[in-house]
Structure formats: C-alpha cells, structure tokens
Image (spheres, coloured by chain):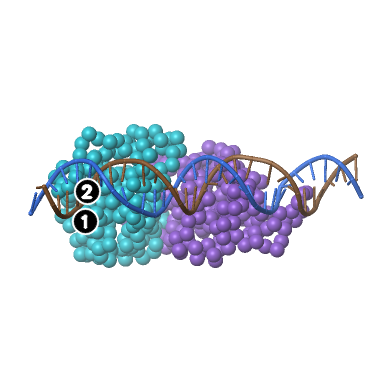
Chain colours: A purple, B cyan, C brown, D blue
Amino acid sequence: MSFTYQYARPALTVDCVVFGFDEGELKVMLIQRDLPPFEGKWALPGGFVRVDETLDDAARRELEEETGISKVFLEQLYTVGDLGRDPRERVVSVAYYALVKLSDYRIRPTTDARNAAWFGVSDVPKLAFDHDKILALALQRLQGKVRYQPIGFELLPPKFTLSQLQHLYETVLEQKFDKRNFRKKILSMGLLIELDEIEQDVAHRAARLYRFDERKYQQLKKRGFNFEL
Amino acid sequence: MSFTYQYARPALTVDCVVFGFDEGELKVMLIQRDLPPFEGKWALPGGFVRVDETLDDAARRELEEETGISKVFLEQLYTVGDLGRDPRERVVSVAYYALVKLSDYRIRPTTDARNAAWFGVSDVPKLAFDHDKILALALQRLQGKVRYQPIGFELLPPKFTLSQLQHLYETVLEQKFDKRNFRKKILSMGLLIELDEIEQDVAHRAARLYRFDERKYQQLKKRGFNFEL
DNA sequence: TATGTTAGTGTAAAATAAACACTAAGTCAA
DNA sequence: TTGACTTAGTGTTTATTTTACACTAACATA
C-alpha cells in the first residue's frame, strides 16, 4: 500500500530526551542505532508519527516501544526541521523531554530495544542526527523549568529525603544551596508532606522521608502561586 | 506531478500569531479565509511548509505573503497535532509568534491578502481550526517571556518614552506598576539609551525619548544577566 | 496668566534573601 | 562500650531588594 500527495511532504517524527537522576548525577537514556544512517551511533529514542495518533501519543508510544518506559512526565520541547538533518530525506521532528523516577526503571532498563542505556549527561558521546542540539535544548529547558515549577519531584522516588531533593536541585541547576535556607524555602511552599518514616539502610543518622503533594500543587497552581526556588 | 510514500504522512503547516501594540492595546493580526474549510472565518496567517525550506523560513515566508510583514521578531511557540483539527485531513502545525512594531505596518497593513486585519486581543472572534487555542498559548508565552526578557521593545517604535514602555508592560502583563519603581528598575538594567530628543506634538510636557540598546543586551545576555522585571 | 495634563524625581518601611555553626542521631570499628 | 565518623536537623542576624508613597516641573491651551 502507498500514499500519494500533490506536493512533497516532509516525514514527521518524534524524539524524546528522557532524563533520570541517580547516584547524584543527571542521566539521559539513549539507544544505539542498529540501522543506517548513523548505524552503531547513539541517538535519542524516537520514530515516525502515525497519521492517526497525536504527537503526545506518538512520543509515549515510541518511548514505551524503545525503552519500556511508560507513564512518565512528558512535555513537548521544540520542533526541529533543518534541511539535511537526516541524510535520507527531509524529516521534521517534534522533540519531547521526559522525567522518570529512575528507581522504577533501573532494574528492567529495556524491553524491546536491548540497545538502550543510561548516560550521565556529561558523558554523552556524539549523537546521531542533530540529537546533540536537541539534548542541549532539553537541558536548558529542564533548568529553566525546574527553577520555576516543582517538576524536580518527577525525577525522585515517591518518598525522598530533603537532602536528596537538595542534591537533585544542585545537580540540575549546577549550583550549591545553603542547607537551612533550602529547607526553609522548599518547606514554605507547602508542597511536601512529612511522612512518619525515615530512610532505611544508611550508615548514619537516617533522615525523615517526604512526599510531593500533587493535590496541593494543583490547587496552588490554579491560584497563580509562585513556585520559584 | 505527485509524490508517493509507503506510509501516510500528515500535512505540515506553520501558523503565526502576530502581535502588535497600539493605542494602549495589544493587537493580533488575523486573516479572513476565502476558501473552505471555515470560509469567511478569521484565522491565523499560515500555510504549508515546503519540503525545501526550514520551519523558520516557512513561517517568515507565509507571514510576508499573507500580511506583508517581514523582518520581525519571530519565535517558535508550539506544535499542534491533534486529530481532527483540520476536517479535511491530518494536519500538524508548527505555531510561531511574532512581535511587530505597529508603527511600521499600520499604513500598509496588507500586501497580498486584502483580508488581513488587526484585532484587539480581547475582541478576537471565534477562529478557524484550533487557532483559539494557539492564540491563548501565544498570549501565555508572551506574558512569560516579557517578564524575564526584554522583548517588549519589539512592539514599540524605535524611539519611545518610558511611559509608553510602562504602558506596554502593564497591558501585556495585565498589571499596574508604580511609575517611580518601574523607571528605577528598567533604567537600572542599563538597556536603554537616553536620546537627546523629546516627544513631538503632545498637548502637555513632552517626555524624553529612549531607544533599546541591542548591543548591550547581547553582551549582558552572554554573561547570564537577569532581566526579570 | 490661569488651568490642565503628563513628566520627572527620592526616601523610608517592609519583605525577602543570604550568611552562618552547632547539637542530635545513628553506624561502625577498635 | 566507647570513641570516631557521618549526615540530619535547627534560628538568628545582616544585607539586599521591593514596595509604598507625593510633590514640583514643563509645556499646551483657553
């Protein structure tokens, strides 16, 4: 079967920059290409948009198919359409970025594509296509977003300590924070619920666990509350 | 001539939300459709992306063709691709927003499409396709952007008074500012050059004119300077 | 020359952000 | 069991930033 149009049409794809956080480092999931062009090179997970699915759906589907990751925070990033970004033909790609709780996915890192792996963002090799550029954009966006919206929680396990949270912010924003000031600020937003639990299996005083109050967040967001860190 | 592909491809278009500022009001340029679907309805200027032009080029070309506007501030906004947004077939559209100095374009509002007109953003009728949604997105983005980056100048004539500037900010952000505090803040950014000229033809004390220091802006931007208002 | 309209200017009070150091709780090894 | 080590947890003071606020100056017009 084939499809014919009066004018040439670019191919339309989605690509996903998937961020995770582990061992105090920001990671990104890449897959190794097993077909030309750029065979053997690492690339962002992604693929063609089907004619009967939305862009968001396409991004989620490709993510699931290529990395086994589903039900994550996912947002559109930017659409790239430079000429020659794919050597075969004109391809326009809608880039997304996703934030995943690595604790959920470290064990079974891949389902379909055995060639998926996590890279520290500073150890990423030269990527296929213009994926370097997309990754750089995603990092920029992540930094901008994290600063003003409480999306950092998407990268942590459901229960976390304030130190973990601070560490995450420091990593993503490449900036140190004062412990007391950080705690004051983050707690004053009223988005954290203090749990009756503490860390387990640590070789020092165990810290209290917290979780993110999604409900409260939605309420405050509606009222135009300011979540700047 | 025709083009055949193995899989169905969505059509790819660009749409532009063009903002102007005049008479103390934020305006948006719309064109009246002269073909189905939505014949007679108002819509955002836009059209198909050619297979040999970048997305930015397509946006600029369509803008020029449909409204006669060229050489303006133009940035990608969001890509919409919901099913059924165009009743004819699957169409994915990369939306842009543009800021124009209305002083330059009020006289010859349109070149090609005689059906172009400026609307106050609060007087916009129900638009074709999902263009209402795109316009709402663009407004949101404009507000967010103006707050943190000095792009408001793109909407003013090259020489302007501080009152005009304040008025613009108040309109876009839907928020009043204290005159003295506003002037202090905006001048302290060091982005304005005080000219040796004053307003003409006003029935009261004439205000000093300023212009935006693009050079200085680029310098400070590189150094990660904060332009929050 | 009196009236109307907008331009232009500084200071004090309040709120926010930044700097800063010790005690508490637990693990581990001697 | 005790001492050493590691991270958790907690308030106050100072500096900086933001807000609130009101009068005189300049010019046009009647």
Residue at 21% over, 60% down: B32
- Residue B63's label in the rendered image is none
Q: Chain of mark 1?
A: B
Closer to the camera in the image, B127 or D12: D12
Query: How far apart are the alpha carbons under marks 1 and 2?
Result: 10 Å
Near mark 2 (Cα within 10 A), the count class, few <14, some 14-19 or many ≥20, is: some
Query: Would residue B70 appear left or right of A10 to someone viewing this image?
Result: left
Find residue B59 and report its horizontal and vertical position in percent: 30, 48
Q: Which residue is mark 1?
A: B118
In terms of depth relative to the viewer, which is nearer, A70 or A194?
A194
Q: Tell me: B156 left or right of D1.
A: left
Amino acid on which the number 1 mark rests in the picture: Trp
Secondary structure type for disc 1:
strand
Residue A127 drawn at (x, y percent): 52, 40
Q: Are marks 1 and 2 on the same chain?
A: yes
Q: On what subunit does the disc labeled 2 rest?
A: B
Image quadrant where residue B73 sits = top left
Q: Which residue is mark 2?
A: B102
* Relative image position of residue B97 (x, y in whole percent): 32, 51
CB-based contact (under 8 Å), mark 1 and mark 2:
yes
Q: Residue at x 33, y 44 (%)?
A: B183
Q: Secondary structure at mark 2?
A: helix
